[in-house]
Every structure is written in structure tokens, then in C-alpha cells.
Image: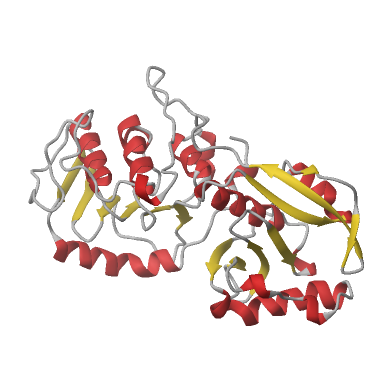
Amino acid sequence: MNPNTNFHILQKAWADAEAEIMALRSAVFHQEQGIELTLMGDAQDVSARHFLLYLESNNIPIGTARMLSNGRIGRVAIYQRHRGQGLGLALMNYLHDIAIQQGLSETTLHAQSDSIGFYQRLGYLNEGEPFEEAGIPHQAMKRTVPSLDTPIDFTPDPGSPHTIIKAPSAEDYTPRGVRPAGEPIETDATLGETGALPHLTDLSQIVDHIAALIKQADEKVFIYAPTLVPTLFGHPKVLAAISASARRNPLSKVQILVSETASLVKQHHPLLHLQQRINSLISLRCTIPAYRLDSLTLVLADATGWLEIIDDKPLTLSGNFNDAGRVKQWYERIEHPWNHSVVPKDIRQMSL
């Protein structure tokens, strides 16, 4: 991955992205490879999940792929001038994360013969004999999707290894957070009920309140923490709360905004390992100098609760678990920093 390549990936419906997708497919499959234009799309496009990869400096997608409900991946295309930068790998890894999220047992594809090595490096195995498709030699391939029940590659507390367990169906999701958060979190602060907090300076109390706010969120958690202070965001209680909130229901999302990731990688920060594991559920982005937030650390839960580190010497936490007006103001302030933030180069390509 080129360290200067910043990008993001969006999932779009066919009705919203047909023109962009067809422009990419036509350039790669028709103009480069000579495949007939009539084969650029098919009836499955309407129901498929479509993914487009954008460079931060351009609103025009430079890569695309689709995935069917059965895990069949296809129409993977990157503009020729943007190949060799790891973008195809990043796009495939994103699809693999979606496959985990959807509870698929495997992903399959038909690889062009000159792309077989690329897919083998991603864990795909050949299935059957080579064949010809659209006049080009192909090979059917299959990859087993790892389960979210497998342990994460970190143990922040040697006595309490954590495992992510995904809700396998809509009926198994927890529709609302437990309120108050409950053990092992040691605070009765309740989202939607508890008002302004006294300023907290005890580290254990700060950790418990951050974990409690995150764990009780029903749909949305936003975290702005420039350095992801390990004593806070690497703490097992906070990690478990983030994991639970991200997987609460199909609408849940966790957004994390940091200043940079290089130092976090060197620290082997456990939250990065969690984000890698379920990066389709947890978005991690970096601010740019022109759009930084004027806050040391900020945590928002749904449209109701907020916590802010207002001083770091000593570490001091302020907040309110029932302050919709202030939360609305915060969301208005973070809109531009988030929309202008960039995706860090694929952390999976760094040495964790």
C-alpha cells in the first residue's frame, strides 16, 4: 500500500450507483479486455451489494466490486493507472469483513487466470478445472469465512481474554442497551436519565463512565480521541463496551476519529486489533489539519449522552448522560471534521 494513498469504500444500491459502476466495468472489462458491452451487467446487479472505492482527492470511484447474498464476489475492477497500490487488496478485505458481518460461511468467485495468484494470497483455493467465461480463461475459487466466534488477536487483560460473538440473525440482536450498564462496570449512570456529572479525576471512575456510556448506546457511538489513550481506550471494560455496541443491532455503528495511526500501531493498541476484526462495524478515520476538533477527548452516545476529557493534568472527565441539546451541538461541530477525515492506510498492511 502506498503510504500516501488515502481512500474510503462505500456500499451503494444499484439504483444509486449504476452509472459509476458501469463506467468502471466498461473501462476495465470492455476497453482493456475486449469483453462485450452486453456482458457488463446482469439481472443480479439489482439485488447485489455494490462497493465503490474512492480516493480522498477525487469524488469519482476508481474501484468497484459486488457481492451476492450467497457470498459470490464478482465484477472486481480497478482503473489501470491505480493498480499496484494495494487498493484491490483493501477492497477485497472490506468485502471479506462484510461476509463475516453477514454470517456467511464462504465466499466464492471466478478468477481470471492471470489473477489466480492474487486471490490465492487472500486465502482462496481452486475449485474444479479451469474454464472459459466471456472468452477469457477462468478458475472457480473458494475461501472459508472465519467466524467472529474465534478469539481476537489481543489480550489486554491476561486474566480476561475477549472473544467477539456476532449475533447470527436479527432475532438474536440485543435491540436496546442494558441500563444501567451493570457489572463489571461500576457506575449506575444511566443513558437518558442521569444528568450532569461532577468532574471526575479518578482513573477507574473515568474508565467506568466511558464504558457505561458506550455500552448503553442503542445505535450510534462517536469517539474523538487523537491518541486513543491506552489507559482509557485500551482498557478491557471499554473494549468490551465498544464491541457490544457495534454489534447491538443491524443499525448500530461506531465511529472513531484519531489524529494518526502510526504511533497506535507501534503501541500494538488493542482497539486497532478490534477494529481490524470488525472494520465493517467500526469506522476508524484520521483528522486532517484543517478540520480538527477543539477537544482533548469526546464520546457521544446516540442523541442523548456525552463525555469529554476537559483536562489532562490531572485527567478530568466532564459529561451528562441526558443532554440531547448539547449532543446535537456536538454532532453539528463534528460533521465537517468527520466528512473531511481520511481513511488511514490499510492497518492490515502494517506490522501489528
Answer with the quarter of the image where residue 144 lies: top right
Q: In which quarter of the image is residue 241?
A: top left
Residue 118 in percent (x, y) is at 79, 49
Residue closer to the observer: 167 or 95: 167
Q: Please, is residue 289 above or below residue 206 in the view?
A: below
User: Percent x, y for residue 18?
Assistant: 62, 79
Q: Can residue 314 be seen in this view?
A: no
Query: What is the total number of numbered labels drawn onto the structure image?
Result: 0
Where 83 falls versus 161 (above or below)? Answer: below
Who's the residue at 84% across and 47% down the image?
117
Q: Is residue 79 visible?
A: yes
- Residue at 72% over, 66% down: 75
Q: Tell me the quarter of the picture where residue 215 sits.
A: top left
Q: Viewed as shown, does residue 337 lie left or right of 152?
A: left
Please tell me which residue lies in front, 258 or 246: 246
Find residue 84 and report its horizontal and vertical position in percent.
78, 57
State left or right for residue 273 relative to residue 140: left
Please tell me which residue is depicted at 63% across the width and 53% down the height of the picture.
71
Of residues 340 and 284, which is closer to you in this image? Answer: 284
Quarter of the image for the C terminus: give it.
top right
Q: Which residue is drawn at 64% across and 60% down?
A: 5
Q: Position of residue 129 (x, y in %)?
A: 90, 48
